[in-house]
Amino acid sequence: MLEDYLKLAIDGIMHRKLRSWLTMVGIFIGIIAVVALVSLGQGLQKVIDEQFERVGGDRIVISPGGGGTFTGAGAGGIFSAAKLREGDLDVVSKVRGVDSAIGFIATTGKAKTDGEQKSIPIFGAPTDPKQQKLLRQIDFFVVDAGRYLEEGDRYKAQVGFRTRDFFDEDIDVGDKIEMEGIMFDVVGKNKKTGNPFHDRKITIPIETLQELFNKSDEYSLILAKVEKGSDVDEAAENIKEKLRRYRDVKEDEEDFSVETAENVVGVFKDVFGLVTGFLAGIAAISLIVGGIGIMTTMYTSILERTNQIGIMKAVGAKNEDILLMFVIESGMLGLVGGVIGVILGLLISIGAEYLVVNYGGIDIFRIYAGPDLVIGALLFSFLVGCFSGYLPASRASKMHPVEALRQ
């Protein structure tokens, strides 16, 4: 019986091709928007997860101004009026539960090679052997070719994987690069991370950066590693307490920020979740419009097929049979629109990923469209069709066979 209903539903759609296509437009436009937005949003969330997995769950980030973030590599430290000092680093290093801590400086400077001068991110990193041990565990400081900066280095530099984005030719180990009028020897090249900010940076000894940019006794960021077996959240609270006391600030009036990787990931995921949900909600409005279109089409279809309904009732079809037939037909309209929407939505997402990776330089970005998204979109579009067709189908099922045959 169900097979017969499906055949009748498909026959009804195929005999009204233009009207069916126009009816499905509202459905698949909504599904396109929902699938594209959600897959891009989930892809961004996975990028964030992967980045912080690389940093490590046992790390704590301390930034000035109460709003710095590790993903910006200390950007908060560049623009904040508050500063982190050597004393802050000493306090953090001595906190119970902290194994070691290092301070970075991030700024923007002029770099010149083969006559080309560009503004480029410059990092100042410590060369002390103990601090270098922690530094080498951070993904975007890992050297892929050449060597790490060593104690005693003064005008040596490491370059990121994609410095060619700034200059016509790539910079490799053994080349020279001029920064702020000083010639530096390139001794190392960092491995590719996929993050354009980290892949384009140049790293020099922190003492040299402090001298060149007049940033003595100042850090853009402090990174602490928690001792094995210690609780990360507890260590973060200990750091907050010690820094409040050292900097003489009250609770909730801090001029610094202490975040664990998990906390920062949670904030980003919450923000992305809200934005994605809001945009998907706006896109879902078109599904309501599509549902109204299906309802209108089904009412028109019922008027055209009144005589057919009368014949079916005359030969023994029950009210629920007529109801089910038209509900299935409206559900099919929604489902087919959903299938088209999912396919086009995924194609748009893939196109966006291609543009971001190839022209935006963010190699780590990937869309994510799990089976729950695809199945959910198809099920939702089918249900929209069914609900939209229920009222017209209910009207058709209640027709009196004699009255229907007269028309």
Image: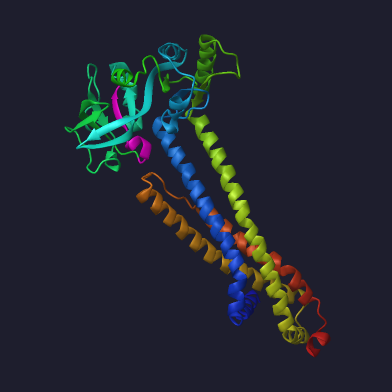
Q: Residue at x 70, y 64 (%)?
A: 387
Which residue reaches farthest bottom? Answer: 406
Q: Does residue 144 appear anywhere in the picture? A: no
Model colouring: rainbow
Does 51 sit above or below residue 18?
Answer: above
Q: In x, y percent, where is residue 381? A: 61, 62
Image position, residue 253 (x, y; %): 59, 18
Q: Closer to the camera, 122 or 119?
A: 119
Q: Position of residue 103 (x, y in %)?
A: 38, 20
| Nearer to the camera, 248 or 129 | 248
Q: Is residue 146 left or right of residue 351?
A: left
- Left/right placement of residue 292 relative to residue 80 reads right
Left or right of residue 395: residue 72: left
Number of residue marks: 0
Q: Quadrant of residue 91?
A: top left
Image coords of residue 254 (percent x, y): 56, 18
Query: Quick check: 230 above or below 381?
Result: above
Determine if the magenta segment contains residue 118.
no
Instruction: Report the quarter where the C terminus lies.
Output: bottom right
Q: Tell me the magenta residue range.
A: 194-205
Q: What quarter of the picture does the N terminus occupy?
A: bottom right
Residue at the left extreme, as displayed: 174
Quarter of the rendering containing residue 31: bottom right
* Residue 200 belongs to the span the image colors magenta: yes
Residue 335, image quadrant? bottom right
Name the residue: 26% across, 28% down.
179
The residue shown at (27%, 26%) is: 180
